Amino acid sequence: MNGLNTERSAFQRIYRGACLLGAALTIAATAMPGAIAQTSPASESSPAADGRVMLEAMSPGWNLGNTLEAISDGAGPFATSQETAWGNPAVTQALFDAVAEAGFKSIRIPLAWNQYADAQGNISPQWMARVRQVVGYARNAGLYVMINVHWDGGWLQPVYQGREAVDAKLAHFWTQIATAFADADDHVLFAGTNEIMVTDVYSQPTQENCEVQNGFNQIFVDAVRATGGANANRWLIVQGYNTNIDWTLGCNATLPDDSAESRLMMEVHYYDPYHFTLDAESDKWQWGAIATDRSATVAGFDEAYADAQFLKIQRQFVDRGVPVILGEYAAILRNDRDREQKFRNYWDLYVTYSAVRHGLIPVYWDNGYTRDHSSGLFNRSRGRLAYPATAAVIVEGTKEGLKKPIGD
């Protein structure tokens, strides 16, 4: 870890080089054929070796945000896809080809299920077919794929009240999803939930919250494994409480029981500091060692803070042979303050680098919108990069992070 202090000083050079690379990027769209591919990655014997294999194979990753998890204002259940309900276009093969061409190796696909299910929780076959088609697009492009039960309208509340019905519904959903993807190989990973929390309660979770949320993780694992076949040994991703790093350490230090050996990953997210990354009204628009106005930064939330947070996760999980997905991270575009995107790109570069250096697989949150105060990287309608410099710094941060052993 001592080397991180001296390496931080080199990031201005890396940042400049990555931005030049991004400015020169062009996307060559190539058509790729059909169904869910059936090849598996090589794997070594120990959990730590398997974790390193997955880190290298899946980094960096990209989120298909605000699309297949979009909730319609209309009354369900729906048989047809509502993926355009939040303003993003329907997903195409061309988009995923562009994602792969830009240097991303994995895609996280957030998903809604509840609006496509009947009163008994049976998911529409038409919706399941569309999800399989989109996963097929990703596999055609040579990408790893993560699918989940995302916010889904907020029915997954970590409280005792109504727990039995919620647990049964989650199990029923995952039994259907796992069965539908029983023919997929290890390039398709399942993630049980998303940012589980009591709605609008951002304070530290209670013992009740932790217990119920851990229960969701266990139900997910049990439901998938019970379907057998390839799912008996598939990589499964469980979530920390609200995917908050500190609360994950407090609530989720013990993983669910699993009939498969060393095939679980943990998921956390990172949006620190909030007033820089997500708050469009904030006057905090600079970050890190390259900042020129300290009053425009959030004190204490710099490179060293990111390193310290990821080190906690490394020690609790990665060092014990448990791979970790950094399932979301991004800083919004601030053209109102930083038209050159200098500070957002530097944040993306350093957070990607530090995550990988500590063994976390970084998956950038792209919400699909390329306007100001958004985090979209691609023009999804055209299947082309909109912000090649930002994509380039994410790829470059990954390469730099992989150059040394984890945490060295």
Image (cartoon, rainbow, N blue to C red):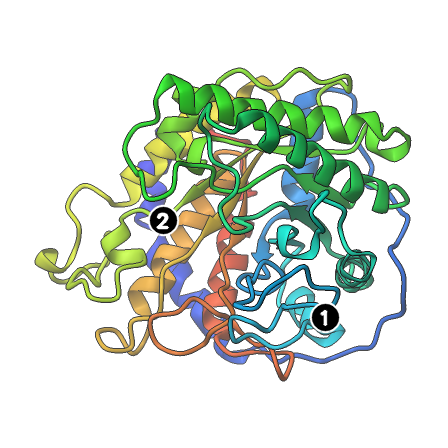
Mark 2 or 1, closer to the camera = 2
- Label 2 packing within 10 angstroms: few (<14), some (14-19), many (20+): some
User: How far across and how far down the image is residue 313, in percent?
Assistant: 45, 28
Identify the residue at horizontal 70%, vertical 32% (top origin): 171
Q: Is residue 302 visible?
A: yes
Q: Callout 2, which amino acid?
A: Tyr
User: How far across and how far down the image is residue 146, in percent?
Assistant: 67, 47
Residue 222 is left or right of residue 406, and the answer is right
Where 149 sits versus 317, above or below?
Answer: below
User: How far across and how far down the image is residue 244, in percent?
Assistant: 39, 35
Q: Which residue is mark 1?
A: 97
Where 60 sits versus 265, above or below?
Answer: below
Identify the residue at horizontal 28%, vertical 38% (top origin): 304
Residue 212 is left or right of residue 309, and the answer is right
- Label 1 packing within 10 angstroms: few (<14), some (14-19), many (20+): many
Identify the residue at horizontal 59%, vertical 61% (top origin): 64
Q: In terms of image quadrants, where is residue 403?
A: top right
Identify the residue at horizontal 29%, vertical 77% (top origin): 335
Q: Which residue is mark 2?
A: 271
